[in-house]
Image (cartoon, grey):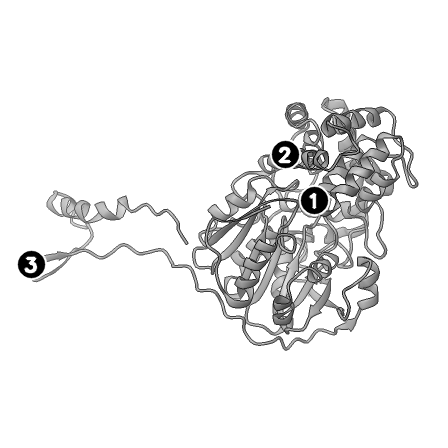
Amino acid sequence: MPRTTHRVGVALLPLLLVIAACSAGPSERPAVAYHDGEQQVVPAPQPPKPAPVPPLGSPSDDSLNWEDCTEQTRGELGGLPTGMTFSCARLLSTLDAPESPERGTARIALIRAGSGHVPLVVLGDVGGEPGTTYAARLATQLPPELRNTFDIIGMDRRGTGESDPADCVPPAQRDAIVGFDPRATDRTALDRLLESVLQASQECLLDLDERLQAYDTWRAASDLEELRLELGVPRLHAIGRGEAARLLTTFAERFPGSVGRLVLDGAPDPTRDSIGQVESQAQSAEQTFDTFAADCVSRGCPLGPDPRKAVSELVERTRATPLPAPRSPVNGGRVVQAILLGLSDRATWPALAEALTAADHGDGAKLAAISAPLVAPQGVNPPWLDGDLITSCNDTTLRVPPQRSSELALDWVNRFPLFGGAAAQRMVWCGSWPVPQQPLPSPRRPDLPPIPVISTANDPLLGMGSDHMAEQMPTGVLLRWQGAGHGAVGRSPCVTEAVSRFLVEGTVPTDGMVCPG
């Protein structure tokens, strides 16, 4: 794969050594070897070359206790393809809390589908639907050659789904955080948000105690290594969507000898701090909304000829007067959060347009249903907010003071009128959170195998992070999808085919390959 290498220093090295040999200097200068009257210069050490694509390896010989869970999965997904079955298990991993290193137990929920018996782990964003649900849904969309080669294995991240769930934020605080005014900019208003987050963190500390700081990406990488050992395979093959790409790069940095064929389906930007990442996400969300609006207009949009204006006015109205809905009123914050979730899957864009139109006519029920997973349990799964709040604050060392949060909110609300405020509020989340003792490593190992990184042109949850991840990783291979939504595997036939060839055959995609939207 093409990578730019600077060789000026290497070219000048022999000349510099000759000059040094002819100059007066201390007697302890480095010795120079001579042979037949000619000076022999020891070549400079070369950086490690990328490892080859790892073999698939033999089928797993795991010691996990799998039990059929097809009917439960059918209920979660609302149906399954004929003949598709699922089994579930629990992995007992080491909790490794900061106060009790290498001690304690973390219970990790797993799901499996497919008939190939070579494990392929599928990971989703910690702030989205549980990993087992996401993996099961993706398994129904993958081509037969993948399902016949691999067992698709999903994992609920620590504190999410059924993996020792972090169901600890009081309902009132969840509603306050998710529904906070998306256009608030003054310090007094943001202090109210900080108070809600502080109460949430205090309740979670009381409920989880030492486990609270053990729910992070650093330790989740150890869960993957534990999973590999329990599956009885030499290397772990995996797909990570969005924020889960950071989990896979952390796993690769910590356990390079365990790395199999990895695919990053979108990725956070490793070159920017938390503020830069969230700012880029707000910009990308605005861009994705414009794509949604143009698509809606092309289909005779029920929001009218200017969807952005209609939605902006809806947000402004609901800031003052929330809409009636079955569980709780839908205010401006819930409207914005519902839009962000709806934009993540282009297949749901018509339903999002209908929900926004209903809200424009005074009925908030459909928008409430879209954003409900953030604040209300979904079957056996806890609200998404809790695991997202805990893991994201445990993963970042940056703490933004209140005055800086207010400055960011004022700037971003002006520049990103729909999503800038909600983005700035994430900076408030971690203001009173303990700073983690273990920062996440940068993805810089040059001796890993090739790792495809997929960039989606209009991703509401990621900016240019995927492009920058591919550039930062010495073995990154960039694929660009000109589509919209969060995650391309299973949605873009072109991307899915390239990923399938890589995973099944070991064929590395061409760096810079572009797939149509």
Query: Which residue lies under the disc numbered 3?
Result: 37
Q: Is residue 13 left or right of residue 86?
A: left
Real-space Cα separation, disc 1 to disc 3, in angstroms: 70 Å
Q: Is residue 178 left or right of residue 329?
A: left
Q: Earlier in the sequence, mark 1 or mark 3?
A: 3
The residue located at (26%, 48%) in the rendering is 10
The residue located at (63%, 37%) in the rendering is 281
Q: Secondary structure at mark 3?
A: loop
* Crowding at mark 3 (Cα within 10 Å: few <14, some 14-19, many 20+): few
Q: Earlier in the sequence, mark 3 or mark 2?
A: 3
Query: Which residue lies under the disc numbered 2?
Result: 287
Judge whether 215 appears above or below 291 on screen: below
The residue located at (76%, 34%) in the rendering is 301
Give how far across and how far down residue 184 sits, in percent.
75, 25
Query: Which residue lies under the disc numbered 1?
Result: 344
Front one among 125 and 14: 125
Front one among 295 and 1: 295
Q: Quadrant of the N terminus?
A: bottom left
Give how far across and how far down residue 97 sits, in percent.
68, 55
Q: Is residue 498 left or right of residue 17?
A: right
- Tell me the kind of residue under disc 2: Gln
Q: Nearer the viewer, mark 1 or mark 3?
A: 1
Judge whether 258 appears above or below 47 on screen: below
Judge whether 423 appears above or below 119 on screen: above
Give how far across and how far down residue 259 sits, in percent.
53, 63
Query: Is residue 218 visible in the rendered structure shown here?
Result: no
